């Protein structure tokens, strides 16, 4: 269902919602009051051109080195299949890694202005919860501990939970005066729950948080301030989502590095070119007027990526606040992890179905849309060509996985090193410490893709053949 399908009269409220406050100053007015003198930076266009040129040179040299490899493989499987295989295994991943390395080296993110505790504009937080009795109380406590320096209202939407989530929320209303609760009459999906909560929002800024998350110190203020200090055309800013239950087992230990390294690196680079492709529902801030412009959250599997692409197609920018940290529970079994990544892959296909026109929008971030368009091909080649090639290499047949595949490894290692240094610096600034997790890192660096990319392929296939849209929290 769409945003306009909801009204307060159609919802069962556990408490009478207060009369919304009078209109507040615009986001732009607050932003102008906080922006300070900025250092001069290399223009974004120049950074993009330099990074792109370096990536092209790397890809060209890699291709020259791979000519003999392609010729040998062509004799076995034909030239077209050989080119598709080698470009998917080495050339294109090398291009992407080279672009990421160059961009990370050129990235100089402007710091927030000094008045970090200055009064900030009113915000509304939406929490869509489904069967979150084990964690929702912690989530509310973390919001209360923020001490947000501005007016705060939280709307928790229980989407027909079968456990004690509704009772916990009802009891919490007496403890937290900023909390309002909406009880959905039946489970309708995350997008329906968020739209129901958004129908009550009167503030210029709205934040979404998952019901099993924990906000770290000053996360709300840092997220809001990044929104205010980014360019005025910014419609959303993604927060930094980290793994809360990383000590549970190997599955969560590996994901700790994925969130800390892989996801954070990609978001950082995309935001450098002002086009972060996913303002994740777990922790992001939006301009309310921009949300209304695109019709809120759609009833899809990947409601956050589809919404983000709608904002980008409407001409807005989407940023990333690396110092606005939220810890969330990651899947604790491989089956849960695979289902999660299948949902994310389905969301990518849904985004292309609705917003394919972004492929032809003239802006630096368009290149990342094309990268996403290549992911199904790259994941398919990895799953159906490279993995069998590894098995053949164990028996002495190096036609697919051989010495040339090692060309990609130095750049991949450099990306990991650079991102570790950057993230470690951010952690120090926030009073956090990177925990020792050697086993998780080794598995992440060497074996993670063996599980991840086939799972993504299954997600692409499911989106092509299935019509069901199930509630997903991650």
Image (tube, rainbow, N blue to C red):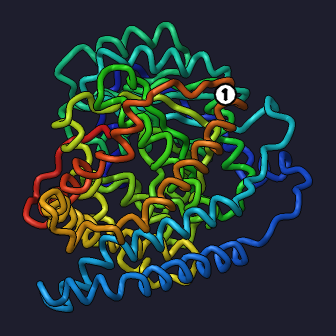
Q: Is residue 183 left or right of residue 79?
A: right
How far across and down, in percent of the image, does residue 155 sit?
45, 30
Q: Going 47% across and 61% down the picture, which residue do you hit?
A: 277
Q: Can residue 354 be seen in this view?
A: no
Residue pointed to by mark 1: 218
Considering depth in this image, is 256 or 203 the residue closer to the camera?
A: 256
Q: Is residue 9 left or right of residue 317?
A: left
Q: In this view, does 456 lie above or below 447?
A: below
Q: Is residue 261 left or right of residue 210?
A: right
Q: Is residue 328 visible?
A: yes
Q: Going 24% across and 64% down the picture, which residue do you hit?
A: 382
Quarter location, residue 88: bottom left
Q: Is residue 247 above or below residue 367?
A: above
Considering depth in this image, is 349 or 167 the residue closer to the camera?
A: 349
Extreme-front residue of the structure: 396
How far across and down, in percent of the image, does residue 271 sit?
60, 59
Quarter holding the C terminus is: top left
Extreme-right residue of the structure: 37
Label 1 environment density (alpha carbons within 10 Å; few <14, some 14–19, many ≥20): many
How far across and down, in percent of the image, does residue 237 sit?
58, 50
**Local SS, label 1:** loop
Quarter location, residue 192: top left
How far across and down, in percent of the image, does residue 15 sit?
40, 19
Q: Is residue 13 left or right of residue 322?
A: left
Q: Going 61% across and 37% down the picture, which residue do you hit?
A: 324
- All told, the count of numbered labels is 1
Q: Going 45% across and 70% down the picture, which residue do you hit?
A: 94
Considering depth in this image, is 23 or 114 the residue closer to the camera?
A: 114
């Amino acid at each position: 269902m769409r945003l306009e399908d909801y009204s307060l009269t159609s919802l069962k409220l556990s408490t009478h919602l207060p009369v919304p406050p009078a209109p507040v100053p615009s986001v732009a007015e607050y932003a102008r009051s906080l922006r300070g003198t900025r250092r001069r930076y290399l223009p974004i266009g120049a950074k993009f051109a330099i990074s792109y040129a370096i990536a092209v040179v790397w890809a060209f040299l890699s291709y020259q080195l791979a000519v003999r490899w392609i010729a040998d493989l062509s004799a076995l499987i034909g030239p077209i299949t050989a080119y598709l295989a080698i470009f998917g295994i080495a050339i294109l991943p090398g291009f992407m890694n080279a672009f990421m390395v160059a961009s990370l080296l050129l990235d100089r993110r402007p710091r927030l202005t000094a008045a970090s505790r200055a009064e900030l504009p009113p915000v509304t937080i939406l929490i869509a919860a489904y069967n979150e009795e084990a964690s929702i109380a912690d989530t509310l406590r973390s919001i209360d501990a923020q001490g947000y320096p501005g007016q705060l209202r939280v709307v928790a939407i229980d989407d027909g939970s079968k456990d004690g989530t509704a009772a916990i929320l009802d009891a919490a209303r007496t403890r937290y005066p900023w909390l309002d609760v909406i009880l959905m009459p039946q489970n309708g999906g995350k997008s329906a729950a968020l739209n129901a909560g958004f129908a009550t929002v009167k503030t210029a800024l709205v934040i979404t948080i998952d019901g099993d998350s924990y906000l770290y110190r000053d996360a709300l203020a840092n997220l809001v301030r990044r929104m205010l200090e980014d360019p005025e055309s910014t419609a959303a800013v993604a927060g930094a989502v980290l793994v809360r239950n990383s000590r549970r087992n190997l599955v969560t230990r590996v994901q700790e590095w994925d969130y800390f390294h892989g996801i954070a690196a990609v978001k950082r680079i995309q935001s450098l070119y002002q086009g972060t492709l996913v303002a994740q529902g777990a922790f992001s801030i939006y301009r309310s007027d921009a949300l209304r412009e695109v019709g809120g959250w759609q009833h899809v599997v990947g409601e956050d990526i589809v919404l983000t692409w709608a904002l980008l197609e409407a001409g807005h920018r989407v940023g990333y606040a690396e110092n606005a940290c939220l810890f969330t529970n990651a899947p604790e079994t491989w089956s849960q992890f695979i289902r999660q990544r299948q949902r994310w892959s389905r969301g990518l296909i849904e985004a292309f179905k609705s917003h394919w026109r972004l492929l032809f929008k003239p802006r630096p971030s368009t290149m990342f849309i094309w990268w996403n368009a290549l992911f199904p091909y790259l994941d398919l080649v990895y799953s159906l060509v490279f993995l069998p090639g590894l098995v053949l290499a164990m028996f002495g047949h190096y036609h697919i996985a051989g010495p040339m595949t090692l060309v990609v490894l130095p750049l991949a290692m450099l990306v990991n090193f650079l991102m570790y240094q950057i993230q470690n610096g951010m952690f120090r600034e926030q009073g956090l410490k990177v925990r020792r997790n050697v086993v998780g890192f080794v598995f992440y660096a060497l074996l993670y893709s063996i599980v991840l990319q086939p799972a993504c392929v299954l997600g692409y296939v499911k989106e092509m053949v299935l019509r069901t849209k199930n509630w997903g929290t991650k």
